[in-house]
Image (cartoon, rainbow, N blue to C red):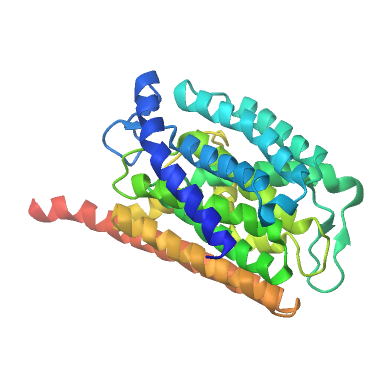
Amino acid sequence: MPVSLQLALAAALLACALTPVVRALALRVGAVDLPGPRRVHTAPMPRFGGLAIAVAVIAVAWIARLLPGPAQLFDPRPLVGFTCAAIPVLALGMADDRWSVSPWVKLALQACAALTLVAFGYGVPVLTNPFGPAIPSGAWNVPLTVLWVLAITNAINLIDGLDGLAAGVVIIACASLWWVSRSHGDFYVMFLTALISGGCAGFLVWNHPPAKVFMGDTGSQFLGLALAAVSLLENRKGSAAVTLLLPLVALGIPLFDSAFAFVRRAVSGAHVFRGDRDHLHHRLLAAGLSHRGAVYALWALSAVFAVVAVLLDALPRTWSVLLVTVLGVVLFVTLEGLRFVQRDRASRSRQRPAGRR
């Protein structure tokens, strides 16, 4: 059995076994997500599910690193850095799931986690240039690394709005990054993406709609940090083929959704950190899709982005502009189509009572 599959299977089994335990813990301490105007679920739902994913990923990673095998040859520094950055993020997520934490406190601690990664060798040494050599970031390395970690972490947090959605999107993104790292012989990235995918798959057994537990901020923030760290590892060699464009495209759906939400709230004068019901998954539900249908549709769209990320690595760099443009058109058409369907449904619902009268 391939090593990556062994790691993924071990993480999946451990996450699946731990999820009922953390679910019971969430119920015991009152870490429960109650129904509300912005919520899709109609019954109280325990959080903390992400703790099972995190423990599975980190525990299996260190066990594999310490036991005889290929992982024993890896430089321990990136794994130490990731573990040190993940622990306070997990504590923050659990506190937010139980008591709710200020957005500014979250951003501050996420920035500290990013700086921890930098201290252990993570970073953005180069920037993507489709038409020429990669551009060294120089003094911008640290601020770009912090910005990247904040963007990815909060993108996963914002897309976690439907049962199974975030876990599935993360699995798909990790699969594309695993494939690209395999073609480059970057075994460290393969190692981590296999573990993250396995942890999410094991949790998905309990989180697939209808969910029995939510990953909560504990899970979404950990997974965001994990994906940010993996993509920074993918970028660390500074080769022309391996740039931030690949994870940027692979994570296109959550990144676009969070960026669009930020701009939408800023333009409307709303608080940029205040949630609303205008995310992609809300629009799909408003367009008439079922809960599962909306999740599967976004998984499918994420898979398209993941395939394009793989193609970006395989094709000449001059194709990147065309492929990214095509993705932009796909997203625009999707949003416009959803907006048209929403208006049509709203118009019909207004006309029905008049017809009865």
Outermost residue, front side: 68
Residue at 50 percent of width and 62 percent of height: 302
Which picture quadrant has residue 293? bottom left
| Residue sitting nearer the eye, 340 or 302 | 302
Horizontally, is 131 left or right of 217 in the view?
right
Q: Is residue 350 above or below residue 274?
A: below
Confirm whether residue 214 shows in the render.
Answer: no
Q: Position of residue 281 (x, y in %)?
A: 41, 52
Residue at 46 percent of width and 50 percent of height: 12
Q: Position of residue 284 (x, y in %)?
A: 37, 56
Q: Position of residue 68 (x, y in %)?
A: 66, 51
| Residue sitting nearer the eye, 116 or 349 | 116
Horizontally, is 351 left or right of 71 in the view?
left
Outermost residue, left side: 357
Q: Is residue 47 above or below residue 165?
A: above
Which picture quadrant has residue 38? top left
Confirm whether residue 82 shows in the render.
Answer: yes
| Residue sitting nearer the eye, 205 or 222 | 205
Q: Is residue 28 above or below residue 291?
A: above
**Count of picture labels:** 0
Horizontally, is 327 left or right of 208 in the view?
right
Q: Position of residue 100 (x, y in %)?
A: 49, 23
| Residue sitting nearer the eye, 45 or 350 | 45
Residue at 45 percent of width and 23 percent of height: 98
Residue at 60 percent of width and 47 percent of height: 263
